[in-house]
Image (cartoon, helix red, strand yellow):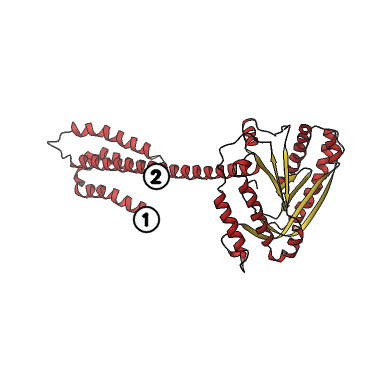
Amino acid sequence: MGIIIASFYLLSPLIIILTQYRDYYPTNVPVFILFISTYVILGASLSHLIKILIAILSISIYLPLIIFKQAITKPIIVDISVCILISLIVLYGISRQVEVARRSQDHIVHKSSEQRIEVEKKCDRVDWLLRNILPEHVIEVLCQLGGSYSRNHPCVGVLFASLINFHVLYEEQYEGEKFYSRILNEFYGDIEELFLDRRFLKIEKIKTIGSTFMAASGIQTDSNDQKPLDFDVFRERVQNLNMSQQGEDELQLPVFRPLHIERMKNVSILFADIVGFTSMSSNKSASQLVSLLSDLYGRFDMLCVQMSCEKIATLGDCYYCVSGCPERREDHGKSCVLLGLGMINAIEEFDHDNNEQVDMRVGVHLGSVNCGIVRTKKI
């Protein structure tokens, strides 16, 4: 419809000229040929810039003919009208080209701005995850050199803290689903806040496995940029926590730290540990052992990608992953079983390539799980 209306407005001057000055058709044949040619060019599949250049060239050729024409004896209103009309067409083409260029530029700027913001968000997420998984000094080495990281430390202290009889509490409160996760969240949160004290700045959280919290001292470089813990705030929070435990519905009170837990059904978890790991590690240095584990776990990681499984963590010689979480899958059990078979084949190839004698013990469990993040420092 817009094209029809635009064509009507552009053709109306031509109709007026033909009706008012029909006596001058023989003497103005070049004028009408030029006029019709301009319209044909406008309808051709050419860019706006080419059409504008052709129209400007037509006017530059035709204007001298008007100037040197015998204006005294012959009317030149038709010639002037044609030039004006062609000029309007040129202006329309220029404005159209400017509008298209400006809109294209705005669209590109808008898209690039959205993509830049999205990239910044992804970089922030990756940086947050990286710093929650790896120590600062390890991140610096990996960013500079890449590859795996291995380093010997002459004197290191390792701490293991575990909730006694937590499995009994878990079995009793299992129907509550989130109750045990809430306890772990508070337990780990209190410990992590102690790390902000300047007395414990050189202690690095390593990993949490179930109800066990692991940390080490002597493995990180000097870091004095962390803020000390405000013990008044900490003491007040502990007092509020103790008071909240006397209430009827302690899980609903806002004094607890935020906890994001989701219950997922039909999930398969694969647990795999290396049989013969002790004998393999007894006659090797720490660097050699790390290199071998990096090679083996690298093979497992590629299998996880092929089988659409999600790696959860590694702890020494134990490797475990999940299928059906966080993305639900109907064939989650099949994926884990195929992954386990692939692991057995992969460790046979590993033995052949590295002249080792180790084997795999693999188990798969199917059921429901509670998924979430317990605290945010070193997931």
Q: Is residue 310 visible?
A: no
Q: Where 375 falls versus 42 (above or below)?
A: below
Q: Secondary structure at mark 1?
A: loop
Q: Is residue 186 left or right of residue 306?
A: left
Instruction: Name the residue carrying label 1.
Output: 1
Q: Residue 98, percent across and down?
A: 35, 41
Of the pair 301 and 316, the residue shown nearer to us:
316
Q: Residue 47, percent across and down?
A: 40, 39
Sooner in the amino-acid sequence: mark 2 or mark 1: 1
* Camera-nearest label, 2 or 1: 2
Of the pair 6 and 269, the residue shown nearer to us:
269
Identify which amino acid the numbered label 2 is placed on: Arg
Quadrant of the rendered image containing residue 280: top right
Q: Residue 194, percent across and down?
A: 62, 47
Quadrant of the rendered image containing residue 218: top right
Quadrant where the N terminus is found in the figure? bottom left
Q: Residues within 10 Å of mark 1 (few under 14, many from 20)?
A: few
Q: Residue at x 41, y 43 (%)?
A: 106
Q: Is residue 82 visible?
A: yes
Instruction: Name the residue carrying label 2.
Output: 103
